């Protein structure tokens, strides 16, 4: 039935396949190391080499649509803590709810964890089929609402990192969206009551046939109209810092990854009202920028990696959420715990904060993460991937925690926000959504 094949033919086929494998490996290596010896061939070879892992991820998402919104629980919390020593506080918490297989946004009372109000939003009824087809994260079961801002009139403003910037009423109905669909990460307001939100878009590099993801600082009014939009590339070029972006051996397709625009609302010794702190994850640096003069006042680089969130804790000190996640050629390291880094402008020194306490419980999120520091120096920290919120008092004692978990899995959190009691009263007065 089958014809015999000469042994020399078998060896020849094996030899040819071995040569092809070696050449393919060499081309992938050339692309990873930044050499352009094989040009587009090495780029395509690298893309082909990623197919097995991408197909496996697609298989996982087919069998479990929330596979990348959950992980095996790895945090070690002492459940015998004194929650009664925490004063009442309120948070807006976006999280993936495993019970209904979609994200929800909840108004939660601390320390009781009582849910005072919920927003459950049907995103697909608002977006067109074409929009959902272009961005699968617009599907209701895939959408992650980031950093929701509760307005004075009881509406929520948020994005899907990336998505349009959206506004929903107290009943969870979307009432406004921007035209730009690539808003992402933090949503804050400045002293002029304007929203500050990052956005991005792919722009061409004139010197070569390629593009990269440019990031922008956006100022928007209450109706989500863009008042002003500032290019990060232009900021860096105008301030002679473009070597940070274009001086690498191989430029990243996402060189900035702006994840927090922190507005400064009062004058200080080292900054003025209207200045901004910019957290640039993929450069592992924080920039103090003055929009009024288009000047970079300070570039802060130190013992932190892939940081998220910048908070001003006093006149002359800031705190950074340090993911502590190093990037190698082929993967992201997740070996060290995340912590808080305090930078002192006066001494130009850094200080680790809560490092031992967070190491003890294996607190780590190699991406994302958020924090809020109160006037008394107590703090709430979010490990987005571990689905955990932790409250430490000003003596570094763990006094409260929240876990978004089910059995042996934790589910994603996407940036909580502290809200005042006045806003809580307003939203509860409008909570009749029958």
Image: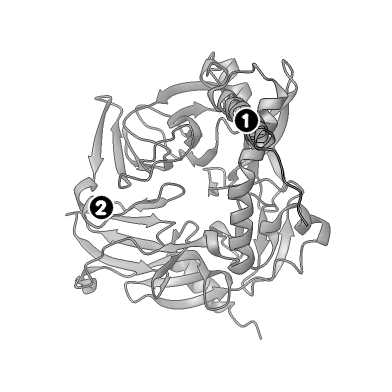
Q: How is the image coloured?
A: one colour
Between 47 and 169, the one lying in front of the other is: 47
Residue ID at (46%, 29%): 287
Between 296 and 53, the one lying in front of the other is: 53
Residue 298 position, x and y percent, is: 42, 23
Q: Secondary structure at mark 1?
A: helix
- Numbered disc in front, either 2 or 1: 1
Q: Which residue is mark 1?
A: 15
Task: Report how many numbered discs are placed on residues in the image.
Answer: 2
Q: Which residue is mark 2?
A: 358
Q: In the image, 61: left or right of 358? A: right
Neighbor class of circle 2 (other Cα within 10 Å; few <14, some 14-19, many 20+) is some
Q: Earlier in the sequence, mark 2 or mark 1?
A: 1
In the rendered structure, are the residues bearing label 2 and label 1 in contact, judged by CB atoms less than 8 Å apart? no
Neighbor class of circle 1 (other Cα within 10 Å; few <14, some 14-19, many 20+) is few
Residue 154 position, x and y percent, is: 58, 67
Residue 274 position, x and y percent, is: 51, 34
Vertical side of 425 occupied by 301: above or below? above
Q: Quadrant of residue 382?
A: bottom left
Between 193 and 140, the one lying in front of the other is: 140
Q: Secondary structure at mark 2?
A: helix
Q: Is residue 250 visible?
A: yes
Q: Is residue 159 visible?
A: no
Vertical side of 345 occupied by 261: above or below? below
Residue 56 position, x and y percent, is: 59, 55
Instruction: For marks 2 and 1, give the CA distance.
Output: 54 Å
Q: On residue 211, which mark appears?
A: none
Residue ID at (61%, 68%): 63
For the C terminus, the quadrant is: bottom right
């Amino acid at each position: 039935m089958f014809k015999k094949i000469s042994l020399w033919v078998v060896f020849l086929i094996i030899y040819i396949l071995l040569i092809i494998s070696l050449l393919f490996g060499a081309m992938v290596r050339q692309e990873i190391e930044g050499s352009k010896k094989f040009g587009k061939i090495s780029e395509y070879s690298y893309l082909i080499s990623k197919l097995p892992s991408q197909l496996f991820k697609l298989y996982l998402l087919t069998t479990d649509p929330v596979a990348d919104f959950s992980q095996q629980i790895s945090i070690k919390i002492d459940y015998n803590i004194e929650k009664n020593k925490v004063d009442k506080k309120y948070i807006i918490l976006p999280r993936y709810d495993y019970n209904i297989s979609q994200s929800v946004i909840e108004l939660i009372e601390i320390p009781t964890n009582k849910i005072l109000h919920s927003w459950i939003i049907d995103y697909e009824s608002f977006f067109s089929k074409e929009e959902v087809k272009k961005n699968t994260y617009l599907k209701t079961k895939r959408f992650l609402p980031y950093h929701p801002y509760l307005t004075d009139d009881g509406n929520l403003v948020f994005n899907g990192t990336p998505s349009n910037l959206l506004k929903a009423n107290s009943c969870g109905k979307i009432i406004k969206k921007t035209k730009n669909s690539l808003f992402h990460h933090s949503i804050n307001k400045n002293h002029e009551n304007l929203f500050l939100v990052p956005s991005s878009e792919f722009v061409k590099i004139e010197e070569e046939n390629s593009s990269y993801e440019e990031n922008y600082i956006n100022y928007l009014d209450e109706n989500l109209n863009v008042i002003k939009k500032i290019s990060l590339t232009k900021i860096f070029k105008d301030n002679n810092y473009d070597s940070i972006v274009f001086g690498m051996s191989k430029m990243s397709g996402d060189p900035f990854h702006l994840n927090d625009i922190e507005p400064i609302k009062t004058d200080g010794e080292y900054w003025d009202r209207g200045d901004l702190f910019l957290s640039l994850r993929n450069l592992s640096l924080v920039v103090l920028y003055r929009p009024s003069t288009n000047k970079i006042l300070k570039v802060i680089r130190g013992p932190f990696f892939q940081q998220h969130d910048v908070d001003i804790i006093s006149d002359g000190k800031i705190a950074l959420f340090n993911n502590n996640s190093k990037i190698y050629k082929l993967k992201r390291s997740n070996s060290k715990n995340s912590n808080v880094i305090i930078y002192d402008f006066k001494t130009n020194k850094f200080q680790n904060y809560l490092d031992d306490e967070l190491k003890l419980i294996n607190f780590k999120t190699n991406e994302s993460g958020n924090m809020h520091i109160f006037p008394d120096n107590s703090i709430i920290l979010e490990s987005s991937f571990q689905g955990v919120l932790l409250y430490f008092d000003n003596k570094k004692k763990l006094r409260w925690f929240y876990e978004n978990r089910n059995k042996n899995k934790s589910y994603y959190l996407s940036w909580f926000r502290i809200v005042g009691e006045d806003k809580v009263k307003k939203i509860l007065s409008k909570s009749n959504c029958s």
